[in-house]
Image (tube, grey):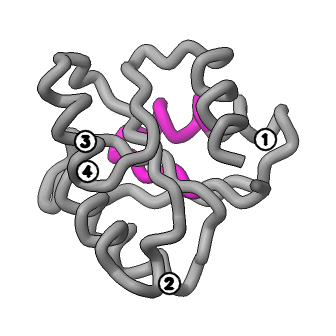
Amino acid sequence: MKKILIVDDSPTERHFLGELLTKNGFQVMTLESGEEAVSRVKELMPDLILMDVVMPGLNGFQATRTISKDEATKHIPIIMCTSKGQETDVVWGKRQGAKGYVVKPVNPAELLEQIAALS
């Protein structure tokens, strides 16, 4: 698992996650919206997607559902990476197709553990 796509509308979060993953040997790509993720995922074909939930337009739950139901992209694991930490959010995220769920502020060790578990 080498290529990770970060989908987050926050430049700060994209930078933080990008730095963390790059330092740990991953190739990182970033997008700023759910729409971008849905429209470009087939061209980018990442090994994993880190998906924020709260974004303008298409939210992370909707983008995850679309990507995980598409024949061409359903094999790509998605980890929700969001400030929405209620149990109902976690359950809903997994129902949409997410394989993992990390609550912000992200604990680097927890995120890397979840990535390793999906490898």
Residue at numbered disc 4 = 60
Amino acid type of the residue tagged 1 in the rendering: Thr
Residue contact at pointers 3 and 4, CB within 8 angstroms: yes
Kind of element beneath mark 3 = helix
Q: Does the magenta portion include 101?
A: no
Q: For mark 2, what is the residue?
A: 42
Name the residue beneath numbered marker 3: 93
Please state the extent of the stretch shown in magenta in the rendering: 5-17
Q: Picture quarter containing residue 71?
A: bottom left
Q: CA distance from mark 2 to mark 1?
A: 22 Å
Mark 1 or 4 closer to N-term? Answer: 1
Crowd rating for badge 3 (residues with CA inside 10 Å; few <14, some 14–19, many 20+): many
Secondary structure of the residue carrying numbered label 1: helix
Question: Does 89 sit above or below residue 72?
Answer: above
Q: Secondary structure at mark 4?
A: helix
- Between residues 21 and 78, which one lies in front from this camera angle? 78
Residue 117, placed above or below residue 29: above
Q: Which is more foreground, mark 3 or mark 1?
A: 3
Is 35 situated above or below 24? Answer: below
Q: Nearer the viewer, mark 2 or mark 1?
A: 2
Return the disc, 3 or 4, that comes first in the chain's sequence.
Answer: 4
Tell me, for residue 22, which label it has, or none: 1
Distance between the alpha carbons at the discs numbered 2 and 3: 21 Å
Q: Nearer the viewer, mark 2 or mark 3?
A: 3
Hey, what amino acid is under mark 3? Answer: Gly
Q: Residue 66 got which mark?
A: none
Q: Earlier in the sequence, mark 2 or mark 1?
A: 1
Give x and y (percent) for residue 84.
22, 24
From the image, state whether disc 1 or disc 4 is nearer to you. Answer: 4
Give the x, y percent position of residue 100: 45, 37
